[in-house]
Structures are given as C-alpha cells and as structure tokens.
C-alpha cells in the first residue's frame, strides 16, 4: 500500500543551522504514529516541513507517493493534511462556532465525513459554548476547538503538535479518548508528544527523534522503556 506520507532523507535548515539530518518516516493510511523526543529534537521542524512552512526539496516529502516538499501550505492542506498547531492559534476575536466555520469554508469542495454536528458530538462542551468567544474557554476546551477546526478541513492526515502540553491529566485523557474515532474515520495521525507513555498508548507505531535524527522506530506495543530511554537521550542499540 502506498504510504499516505513518506519522508525520504528529509533535511531542514534555519539559515545556516541544520535542524533535521535525513529523516525517513512512513505512515500508512489510517495509521497513528507517535513522534517523541526531547525539547529541540526537531519534532516541530518535522511538522513545519510537511506543512510547507520550511523550504525543502520536493522528493523529500511525498503525499500518496507524490513529491510535495516545498509546496506552499495551502497546497498541502488541499492535499488532505491538517495540523493542530502547538499553542492552538485560535482566532481570539471569534466565537467557538466561527472558529470552526472558518475550516468548513476552507474545506469547501473537499470530500469528508466531518461536520459541525460530528465535532459537537465528539466534544459536547463545544456545542454548549458555541457562541462564546474562543479566548474565554479553558485551555483544554480551546484545544478541542483547535482539533475540531483541523478535522473540519477533512484531513486524511492529521498532524498534532503537543496537544497535551499544559493541560490537566483529566482533560488530556478526555482529548485522547476521541483519537480512536479519528482513526476509525480513516484519518492517519502523527502525534508529536513529550509524554512518552501517552504517546505509546495512543499510537500503532512510534518514532523517537534526537538532535534532528530518528534514533528509534518500531511498533509502540513492542518497544521497551530502555530502548526509548537510549533513543531519547542518546546511546547505542536504539533501533527496535
Ligand atoms: N525559527 C528558528 N530559527 C532557528 N532555529 C530554530 C527555529 N526553530 C527551531 N529552531 C531550532 O531547531 C531545533 C529543532 O527545534 P524544534 O522546535 O523542531 O524542536 P522540538 O523537538 O519541536 O522541540 P520542542 O519540544 O521544544 O518544540 C532546535 O535546536 C531549535 O533551537
């Protein structure tokens, strides 16, 4: 089966500073893959490269086998990729529903199963708060809006950048509980996570990144804590 996403020898730079050194990742349609690694490992740079926010060579990123590296973000989004960005980035002056409707307008013409009602059934609190300004919601509720907005883009590949960051454990659980429904809709997911246990539990496969390189990959259920520790902090024998 052609992977929905593959990166081949992906390198990325900020000016002279090299942040990624030949990253190879593959994700099958409907698969959930976690990407873990310490601060500064290159996880966000990886996501930014896919979204077209960093200039890379075309063949370094392929969607459905088609080279798309360096294409502008709107082309990547119309190719079926959506991101839940770190820090959520909602439109602060808009209500919850208006934030969600922006994505519906963006996605017009793209097929998909996500509707406003389906997002409200995923996160019932958003229906209650639909007319409130987004900035008045709690951090967890804002994260739900951000996820809902990404889903309403009808993605086949959803990139999630540290969605648990700064949230209470109960809220994190609530958000992660809906992940299987996203997979069941056929959407592949990349979960960038600092919380290793959460990443392991929520994913089919896992990649660990260290200083811009993949240091471990394997099925999430089969990777040991020791292997993760070695890959996360550096050490030998890290590939499962
Ligand atoms: N805009 C930028 N300009 C220069 N260097 C950057 C920029 N953004 C990130 N970097 C550097 O690139 C490397 C990778 O950063 P990146 O944000 O991708 O890591 P990360 O794994 O997502 O970490 P975090 O968990 O802190 O977000 C780091 O050394 C970081 O300092």
Image (cartoon, rainbow, N blue to C red):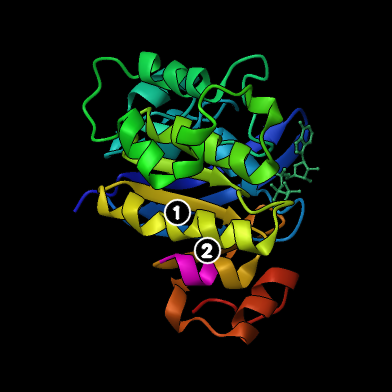
Instruction: Let me know if residue 40 is in the magenta part.
Output: no
Asked which secondary structure carries label 2, the reply is: strand
Q: Measuring 68% from the left and 78% from the top, which residue is drawn there? A: 230
Q: Measuring 46% from the left and 30% from the top, which residue is drawn there? A: 149
Q: Quadrant of residue 107?
A: top left
Q: Position of residue 10 (x, y in %)?
A: 53, 43
Badge 2 density bin: few <14, some 14–19, many ≥20, Cα 10 Å: many
Specify the segment rendered in magenta.
199-203
Q: Nearer the viewer, residue 203 or 168?
A: 168
Prevailing SS of the magenta stretch: helix
- Residue 182 lies, with reference to residue 55, above or below; the image says below
Q: Nearer the viewer, mark 1 or mark 2?
A: 2
Badge 1 density bin: few <14, some 14–19, many ≥20, Cα 10 Å: some
Q: Position of residue 169 (x, y in %)?
A: 66, 63
Question: How many discs mark residues in the rendered view?
Answer: 2
Numbered badge on residue 25: 1
């Amino acid at each position: 089966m052609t992977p929905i996403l593959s990166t081949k020898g992906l390198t990325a730079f900020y000016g002279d500073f090299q942040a990624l050194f030949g990253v190879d990742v593959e994700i099958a349609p409907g698969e959930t893959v976690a990407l873990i690694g310490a601060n500064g490992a290159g996880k966000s740079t990886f996501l930014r490269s896919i979204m077209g926010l960093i200039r890379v060579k075309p063949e370094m990123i392929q969607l459905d086998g088609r080279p798309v590296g360096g294409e502008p973000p709107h082309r990547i989004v119309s190719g079926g990729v959506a991101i839940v960005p770190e820090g959520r980035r909602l439109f602060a002056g808009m209500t919850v529903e208006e934030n969600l409707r922006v994505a519906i307008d963006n996605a017009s013409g793209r097929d998909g199963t996500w509707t406003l009602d389906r997002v409200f059934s995923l996160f019932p609190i958003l229906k209650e708060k639909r007319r409130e300004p987004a900035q008045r919601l709690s951090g967890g509720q804002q994260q739900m809006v951000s996820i809902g907005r990404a889903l309403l883009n009808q993605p086949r590949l959803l990139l999630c950048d540290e969605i648990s960051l700064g949230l209470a454990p109960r809220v994190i659980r609530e958000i992660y509980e809906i992940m299987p429904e996203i997979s069941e809709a056929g959407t592949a997911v990349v979960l960038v996570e600092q919380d290793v246990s959460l990443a392991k539990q929520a994913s089919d496969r896992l990649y660990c990144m260290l200083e811009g390189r993949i240091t471990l990959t394997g099925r999430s259920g089969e990777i040991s804590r020791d292997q993760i520790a070695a890959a996360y902090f550096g050490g030998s024998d890290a590939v499962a």
